[in-house]
Image (cartoon, helix red, strand yellow):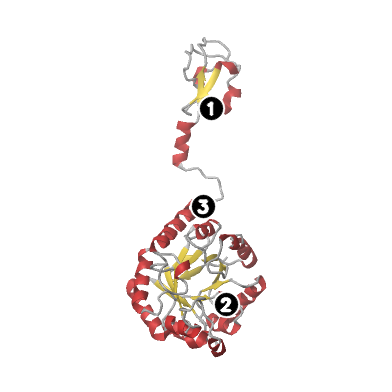
Amino acid sequence: MEELTISGRAIGPAHSPYVIAEIGANHNGDLDLCRRLIDAAVESGADAVKFQSWTKDSLISRAEYQRNTRYRQNGAAPSLEEAVERYQLGSEGLRTVAKVCRARGVVWFASCFAHAEVDLLESLEVPAYKIASMDVNHLPLLDSVGRTGKPVLLSTGMATLGEVERALAALRDAGSGPVALLHCVSSYPCPPEQVNLRMLATWRQAFDVPVGYSDHTLGTPVPLAAVALGACAIEKHFTLSRELEGWDHAISADPVELRALVDGARAVFAAMGSAARVMGTAELEKRKVFRRRMVAVRALKSGERITAGDVEFKRPGTGIQPDELTYVVGRRLTRDVAPEEELEWADLA
């Protein structure tokens, strides 16, 4: 299996999970809020921050705007066009993001949604690309991304295995760098019973690529379970407060949750260890304390033959062990032994 490397950080089954704070549109079009989100993600330990590069003109058709689709079903909700215009970053916003992230020393990249955005992101020297679930079948866009030669994270929400297979082929045919799949369920929020984390193994077996998880559940239990099942990257929406107005704040992790996710993911990965049975020095030392050794039940005389009823086993485990009883029964003692006295091999003829 080929690993990804993003700005020198290897991503794959042998490495601690790569945690991506998905800022997305949670900046609400406010660059000051955007800076604070970047700072908070860095302080929470995220490996990277991710944005979305769409604009009002690149994502949605004029006819759809005219249908006045709303994201929230109440009278105060903005029209679709108003919301998209309000929350877009645009080229200048992305340039500012690049400068802020460079100053903070944090890796950043973005989901791209149009050919021109790929060109813009290339000019900003992003180290990798994210393909959103909606674009698994956008073969022209996949071709543009693939031609950059950069690593790609491909979300699988709403996609069949056949569609993902075709998307991988399109990226590779165009010359992309290594690709990782992110298991994803495009539901906001996603109930845990719909996540199907066992798909992580299916994606891995089907395509032999690194597999991560793009999370839309509430809290941290599900992404931590994904790490336990081998997810090598975790993408989680990120906000300063779930009370903020905007599309994704309510399903996002706040700084406390993101820190818990980062620390928890590292701990879970470390705890997974090896499939080989290994006992460390500390555990071997504990055997001496917690296991048992042979002691006499009654007073025994030198020359007397030992029966199973003459002995029992008590802590510590530094002498004749319970599973060695068969090698003791029937042998003669070489000395007198008092009740409760520990027996040694040297005591046996």
Q: Give the amino acid type for the residue marked by disc 3 in the picture.
A: Met
- Circle 3: element type: helix
What residue would you read off at disc 2? Answer: 134
Across the whole image, how many numbered discs are drawn on residues? 3
What residue would you read off at disc 1? Answer: 321
Residue 18 point in image, percent of width and height? 46, 64
Residue pictured at 44% horizontal, 64% vertical: 253
In the rendered image, the vertical position of residue 236 relative to residue 84, given as above or below: above
Q: Which labelled disc corresponds to residue 172?
A: none
- Circle 2: element type: helix
- Circle 1: element type: loop
N-term-proximal mark, 1 vs 3: 3
Q: Is residue 7 visible?
A: no
Q: Disc 3 versus disc 2: distance between alpha carbons?
A: 33 Å
In the rendered image, the vertical position of residue 229 relative to residue 21, given as above or below: above
Q: Nearer the viewer, residue 206 or 242?
A: 242
N-term-proximal mark, 1 vs 2: 2
Which quadrant is the C terminus positioned in?
top right
In front: mark 1 or mark 3?
Answer: 3
Please tell me how crowded label 1 is: few (under 14), some (14-19), or many (20+) other residues with Cα within 10 Å.
some
Residue pictured at 44% horizontal, 74% vertical: 246
Q: Give the amino acid type for the residue marked by disc 2 in the picture.
A: Met
In the rendered image, the vertical position of residue 81 relative to residue 20, given as above or below: below
Residue pictured at 44% horizontal, 70% vertical: 249
Q: Name the residue at the front extreme.
A: 75
Please tell me how crowded label 2 is: few (under 14), some (14-19), or many (20+) other residues with Cα within 10 Å.
some
In front: mark 1 or mark 2?
Answer: 2
